[in-house]
Every structure is written in C-alpha cells, then in structure tokens.
Amino acid sequence: MLEEAVQKPSTKPQTVLDLAHIHQSFARPGGGSSIVLEDISISLREGEIVGVLGRSGCGKSTLLRIAAGLMKPSSGKITFQGEAVDRPAKGIAMVFQTFALFPWLTVLENVMTGLDALGVKEDEANKKALTAIDMIGLDGFEGAYPRELSGGMRQRVGFARALVVDPTILLMDEPFSALDVLTAETLRSDFIDLWTEGKLAIKSVMLVTHNIEEAVFLCDRIVVLAPDPGRIAAEVEVPLPRPRVRLSPVFREIVDDIYARMTAGRGGAVDEKGKPALGGIGMRLPFTSCHRIVGLMELLAAPPFDEKADLRPLADRLHLDVDHLLPVTEAMQILGFSEMRDGLLHLTPAGNIFVSHAADGRKKLFCDHLLRNVPLAAHIRLVLSERPGHAAPRERFLPELEDHLTARDAEQTLAAVIDWGRFAEIFGYDQRRREFSLPPADE
C-alpha cells in the first residue's frame, strides 16, 4: 500500500515560474533609495492564468519585467523550470501594452522577427509565422503594414509575435488597456477561447492589469498588490468555470470582494480604528481634482445611495474603471469626508455637512480638513507665511518630497496639493512662474 502510494504520480500542478522574496528599489537623485517592491513571492503553476492586479504606481510592470529577466531585482530569486533567471530566458515571451511593432515591416515580417533572433531558418520561420497569424485571426493581412491596421489588429500582431516562438510562459503587461472597449472585449474572448480549447502551446500566463473585471474574467488566481511600496495585499482564487458570465452573482461577488480589498485604506494601511494611516509631508497623495471629489460626495449623498455605496455600482454609475475611481475615494478618505466600512464607502459626518453647505461653507470646511489632514498643505502655507514676499518656488518643496517618494510620486503629490490648495484658497500657484504664494488677504 505504502509502496503504491509512493509510486503514484502526483496530480499537483508543476511550478513553472517562481519569484521568491523579490525586492526592488531605485536610487533617488538626492541620495538614498526608493522602495518599489517589497518581499513579493509568487509561483506560477502549469495550466493557470495568474493576474497581478493593482493601481497605477504599485510596481506591477516592474514585477513583470523582473519575471521576464529584463530587469534584475535588488534582492530575491527568479526560477524558471528549475533554472535561475538573470537575463531574458528562452521560453518566456511578453506582450506589451503598446503594440511595439516595426512600422517598416509587414505583419508577416513583424511576426517573424522573434524567430529570426532564434536563428530559425527562413522557410520554417515563414511557415510558423503564417500559422500564428492564422490562429490569432489575421489571415489575409500578412502583407499589410502596421499603419493599415486598427489598434486591435496591431495588438493581435503583438500576440502572434509572442506566440510564434512557442513559449512556455506568456507574460502580458496590460495588453488590452490601449484598445477601445468593444475591441478589448473581443480580443479577451478570443484569447481565452484559444487557451480553453488548448490551441496555445503555452503552459501558463501572468497578466498585469488594473481592471478588476478583466482579471476575474480571465484569471484562475489574482494577486492583489498594494502600493507604497508594492507588496502583496491579498490572493484571490477564481473558482469559476469557463466561459464566465459577468452578470452571474458569483462573478459579481468576487469583483466586489476585490474592490473592498483594494480600498481598505491607503494601500491597505489602516490604523487601529480602520481609518487610513496617514504620514508626514512625504505622504503620497492621489492625483484627482477637487471637482471630482465634490462630485462623488454629492452623488454618494443622494438617492439611491443615501450616504453609502458599494464601489462597483458607484463605478458603473460614473462610467469609471478602478484606476480612476480609487484615487477619488482615497482622497475623500484622506480628507476625512468618507471612510470604508464593511466593504462600503460611507460619507462621514463631515462629508454630510460638506454636501449640505453652499459654496462658501464648503470652501471653509475643505480648508479646515486640508490643513488638518494633509501635512504637506500645512507645511507649504507655513513656509509661505514665514518667507519675505510670502512666495516660494516649486523647487523649494519638490526635493523634500523626493526624500520620501519616487520622482513620479513626488510630482503627482505636489500636483494634487496644488489643486486642493487652490480650491481651499490656502495658497495660490502661478503655473508660468512655477511659484506658490499666499492669497493677498492672508499676507
């Protein structure tokens, strides 16, 4: 019995790609380093599509480049079929968000470029490329140039170019995000049909996306990344048979669950009361305009929501995807006008008072909350009040932020506080001169 058990082959799917304890940081211009990824461990098993889901700036694309061997991590290990990966590996192919086609080459020639790099003979490369083009639905366009193709057709060329080399793993970096809604949906469905029907030679797929519904539609398992720095906040199994129906209760339940996980405070960091954990002047701010913040509060206060809402119907009502809705809800939480409870976005008492006031009352309340909850805004105003002339250049504050944030996040944070500070009239900003100043009445 024991001997039979030992000899019985394992049914557990084999691990094809393993990322273990991946850290990535980049040097800041003023010294020190900025941590982009922190202790990321993901295993990609044979026969599954794994999604890496998160907001812009959480390090998704950086992680994918590390997995592809295009970038070395600061620490950690990547293993592909038992071999360490420290450079681009044969057997790993990638599809990019931008089509990245050679405009002077035809569809056939673009698809053949990968085979040329592998030294495949021309006749064989031509045959394999034609097969890939036919499989991806571009038969008849072999002699066309990229400028003659629609966006969806160009992305199909990108897929054909990746698949023609018979990779073991396909890595996809938001491959549908540059397409219009209908084209993206068609291409997703065609891809998952090829995968389900076993027409693809690839054994597993890793998909980077910020679209929750796309991840649930395509993936068997979803790794949710939180930002600042990028780290794993949750891992969600998607036990749904294919084809998947977006309107089914279980599909919607999984989408709602991921929405709740992605909005549990700032990147998942909350205090003992479940409120966003705030920092000092180096706190990253989401870039969203005050008009969007005010508009969302007004919508949340009115029927049918009546001060609380599930984010999915809220996003549907606003025709926004997660990357556009979450910065607004995050800003509302930072300012103290809303909070997440039980997976729902609630207006706080201050948020209710705000929407009930006229313009002047709203401005005063926004000013109070901005100075109280955003240390950078209070810091800028204090510096302006102490300087002769009550003015300071943008460069006075940007290096301070870059001591805590990446250059990109520092620029985004400063842009956000400029918009919010102007709305609250706690300071002015001259875009042409790139200069902050106190309003004349406050000098």
Image: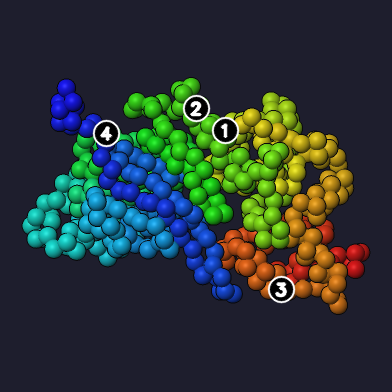
The residue where tag 3 is placed is 396
Which of the 4 quarters of the picture holds residue 135?
A: top left
Residue at 9 percent of width and 55 percent of height: 124
Q: Amino acid at mark 1?
A: Arg
The residue where tag 1 is placed is 312
Question: Mark 2 Cα within 10 Å, few/some/many (few <14, many 20+)?
Answer: some
Q: Which mark is residue 252?
A: 2
Q: Is residue 292 left or right of residue 42?
A: right
Whether residues under marks 3 and 2 lie with C-beta atoms below 8 angstroms apart, the answer is: no
Height in image: 134 above or below 428? above
Q: Amino acid at mark 4?
A: Lys
Residue 237 position, x and y percent, is: 42, 33
Residue at 83 percent of width and 66 percent of height: 382
Q: For this rendering, which residue is in front, 115 or 259?
A: 259
Q: Amino acid at mark 2?
A: Arg
Per the model, the C-alpha gap separating discs 3 and 4 is 57 Å
Whether residues under marks 1 and 2 lie with C-beta atoms below 8 angstroms apart, the answer is: yes
Height in image: 394 above or below 326? below
Q: Is residue 248 left or right of residue 28?
A: left
Q: Of callouts 4 and 2, which one flags the residue occurring earlier in the amino acid sequence?
A: 4
The residue where tag 4 is placed is 12
